[in-house]
Each structure stands twice: as C-alpha cells, then as structure tokens.
Amino acid sequence: MTVRLRAHHLLCMLTFVGEGYTSAFTDNYRRIAERLSKGEEIKLVSGPDDICAPLLNGEEAHCFKISVIERDAAALADISVLLGEEIGIGAMLVPDARLLAKLRRNFASGEIRHACLGCEWGDLCSRIADGNFSGVLIKAS
Ligand code: SF4
C-alpha cells in the first residue's frame, strides 16, 4: 500500500498534531500518520489525496480550488530544489527519519514554506516548528 499525497501535504504532514477541519478529517489523518510513521511509501498525486478524502462530500470542497492547486505547485518547486531533483506526479518518497528531518529543518527555516502563504493554519504550523516539532504525530519509527 502507498499513501497518496498531494504536494503541499508533504509540508502539512510535518506539523500535524491532531488538529483539523472536522473529527472525520482528523480521525482519517491520524490513521495516515500511523502509516507514514511506519514508513509506508508516499505516492505524489495531483489534486485531492488520502488526507482530503473526508472533506470531499461537501458541495464546495476547498481541495479543488485553484488556490490549493497553486499551493501544491509551490510546495513541489520548493521540495524539488531541496532534494536536488525534479519531483513530479507519480514520484515515490519514503518518509524515513532522514527525509522528515531534512524537510522539518528547512520548514523551520522557512525555505520550503512558499506554499504556506495565506494558509489559515500558518500560525499554528509556525508555533509547532518553533517548538522543535514537539507533539507531532508523524515520526519515523
Ligand atoms: S501553514 Fe498550511 S500549508 Fe503550510 S504546512 Fe501548515 S497547514 Fe500546511
């Protein structure tokens, strides 16, 4: 099995502490966090992903909005530069300790946070990064 993630969720997963839009959303996200923490591979997808799934029943799921698609593009560009290789849709990533540490280090410094511009969760994610990612639920085992 693989966890299907859209690009900007490669950032959001770094600061997930159990908060989210609805209880269905956070319950699902917690299950995904467990899988990622066990090292299950990530498959990069375009558009709504496994984290978005519980939000897709609403008439105006924000997951389809252009602004969110632009967030994906910004994250993809930042992460490609960071990893030194072009990461595209369909790419597979292993969420091991090395990758998570590298992403978190550069998230905390702000280098890979262009996708976060205007996000309603921005302050929370900044506080979590400032707190050395204490309490996050996705950690390599
Ligand atoms: S600020 Fe928003 S886009 Fe950035 S990591 Fe947090 S939730 Fe994701």
Image (tube, rainbow, N blue to C red):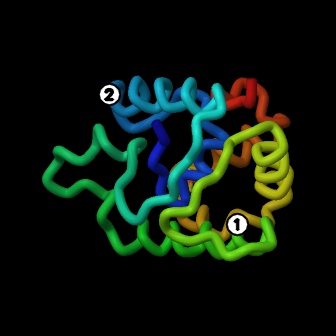
Q: Secondary structure at mark 1?
A: helix
- Looking at this view, is 2 or 140 the one in front? 2
- Vertical comparison of 67 with 54: above or below: below
- Looking at this view, is 111 or 119 the one in front? 111
Amino acid type assigned to the residue bearing label 2 in the image: Ala
Residue at mark 2 to residue at mark 1: CA–CA distance: 29 Å
Figure quadrant of residue 98 = top right
> Which residue occupies 56% across, 24% down?
34
Q: Is the residue indicated by label 2 positioned so its CB lies within 8 Å of ligand 1?
A: no
> Which residue occupies 25% across, 54% down?
61
> Which residue occupies 54% across, 65% down?
118
What crowding class fits label 2: few (fewer than 14 Cα within 10 Å), some (14-19), or many (20 or more)?
A: few
Tell which circle, 2 or 1, labels the residue nearer the N-terminal end.
2
Q: Is residue 120 left or right of residue 85?
A: left
Q: Is residue 122 left or right of residue 110?
A: left
Residue 24, numbered circle: 2
Q: Mark 1 — residue? A: 79
Figure quadrant of residue 75 = bottom right
- Vertical comparison of 6 with 101: above or below: below
Residue 56 in the image: state x and y as whole percent. Answer: 23, 47
Q: Secondary structure at mark 2?
A: helix
What crowding class fits label 1: few (fewer than 14 Cα within 10 Å), some (14-19), or many (20 or more)?
A: many
Amino acid type assigned to the residue bearing label 1 in the image: Ile
